[in-house]
Image: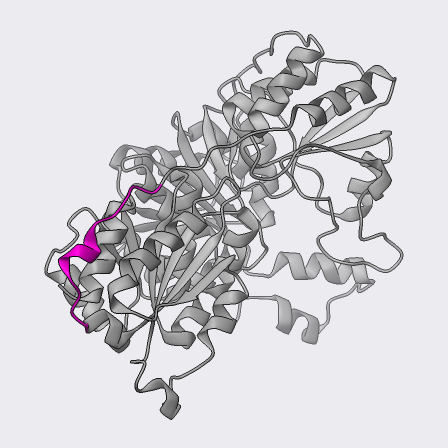
Amino acid sequence: MNGAELLLKAAAASGIEYCFANPGTTEIPLVAAIAKGHAPSLKPILSLFEGVCTGAADGYGRIAGKPAMTLTHLGPGFANGIANLHNARRANTPIVNVIGDHASWHVNYDPPLASDIEALAGAVSGWVRTARQAERVGEDLQCAMQAAWQPRGQIASLILPMDLQANAVSEAASRFAPVQAPVRRFAGDQVEQVARALREGKRLVFIVGDVGLSAAGLQAAGRLAQLPGIRLFAETFPRVSHRGGGLPDLDRLPYFPEVAIEILDQYDLVVCAGVPEPISYFGYEGIPSRLASRERLLSLAEVGDDVVGALTALADLLEAPACVAVEQGIELPSGEASLTPQSVGQVLSAALPDDCIVSIEGGTCGYPFFTASARAARHRVLTNTGGAIGQGIPAGFGAALAEPGTPVFCLQSDGSAQYTIQTLWSIAREQLPVVILIAANHRYAILQNELRRYGVTEFGPQALALTELDRPRVDWKALAKGYGVPASTVRTNAELRLALTRAVASKAPCLIEMEL
């Protein structure tokens, strides 16, 4: 047995199911060990770009609630995946990265692909280690797993020199203790403090995140929402938000800071339930970065705490009434009418099968969908927590692997889809029931919105050259076909309804271009 085989045995013993991989020369011993079947329960998933690997690991971790493993090649390969690891870090997703490095006896010669991998990994990881002994490679992997699989999940990165992968190790090194799943807790005194503020007549606005947006958390939030002096919002970009099926509707806190500040200022105190301090996404002159001053903040539960338990305990303490189910049913727009962002949200919401998953990236249709989806069938929504573009389709891919057979819909803007479009190949290869919906407005709408906020009212040729995507327009059907995914183009609400019906029935991957 060698170090590579030992690492695979440790990964399997730790409960890791998938290895999202884009390996190179320095990972060949690991590839050989996988090929020989030394860890049959660990399934390798090849992707054509490292950003797909890391985005898929993020989506998998959010739905499965435990880490997947990524395998990338040296510093440049890992760097290709950093953007989606940034999103995963903001989502507190547990991920174990294994990064191949040059042989320890070779790296000091500064070969062309040598780089400071520890510095790169440290930018997005809560735990980083370089393996030093082949006999301890399995122990290193288990330490990475334990570091990642915390109540407040984090990214753990293990750098593995090529010679340690190839070196022989003893069978005794392969005896592993099970890695324990994390246990969440909440602080009773924080619950009491929030209850006391309400009893004193304070008006409270809650921002709920983390597992507080699960079905049980929303039901507790729905109880609290019926009490006088309380209003609740979901965080602006939740890692996972349960929606529909009669669950209470927690609208997301508005994105633009002046709107969020105006809402929060109507209340005496802002209660954080599984979210960090609310901060403006970007800084704008004359608008505070903090959406609420620190002296107005109360913490019911921290990120990683038992947010559901804290919300439920508070509802019990305040003797809040039972949660009232939200009425289901979505009013559909005219079938003959052309698609709009609002109609896309309505049609997609009405088409969702029970307990499906929706990965959203892009504001064009994302916000209208979230509004409409409160009355849809029960589903879960993933959003782009860190703002690094290129997450939506890979996260949907990973989510589909976390729950084999569960339909996944990727509601995607056309500009951001191009960052990790290689995911289509991986989806086709695995034949997953993933429906990719491209909002094809052929522009960077968010940039045009920000230009308007900056005072640019007329877009001349230079502004359009930087924000329009129509010269040439992307041929989405041809692109999807090239990656092995069948595709269609829809222009009306009726056409979208029919395409979604067929997609759900096929239980196979497809792409739908929505001309807006």
Residue 496 seen by the camera: no
- Whole-percent x, y for residue 479 in the image: 35, 62
The majority secondary structure of the magenta stretch comes to: loop
Q: Quadrant of the N terminus?
A: bottom left
Relative horizontal placement of residue 175, taking residue 309 as reference (left or right): left
Residue 342 in the magenta stretch? The answer is no
Q: In this orientation, which residue lies closer to the viewer: 511 or 488?
A: 511
- Whole-percent x, y for residue 369 in the image: 56, 36
- Whole-percent x, y for residue 403 in the image: 32, 37
Per the rendered image, the range of residues in magenta is 167-179
Relative horizontal placement of residue 286, taking residue 446 as reference (left or right): right
Q: Residue 371: which quarter of the image?
A: top right
What residue is at 38 percent from the left and 88 percent from the top? 108
Residue 10 seen by the camera: yes
Relative horizontal placement of residue 302, taking residue 139 as reference (left or right): right
- Whole-percent x, y for residue 159 in the image: 37, 68
Q: In this orientation, which residue lies closer to the viewer: 395 or 296?
A: 296
What residue is at 25 percent from the left and 68 percent from the top? 134
Residue 177 in the magenta stretch? The answer is yes
Q: Is residue 417 above or below residue 334?
A: below
What residue is at 56 percent from the left and 13 percent from the top? 325
What residue is at 71 percent from the left and 25 percent from the top? 189
Q: Is residue 8 above or below residue 291?
A: below
**Residue lying furthest front:** 172
Q: Is residue 96 above or below residue 217?
A: below
Relative horizontal placement of residue 311, taking residue 259 as reference (left or right): left
Q: Is residue 388 above or below residue 60?
A: below
Coloring applied to the structure: one colour
**Residue lying furthest bottom:** 109
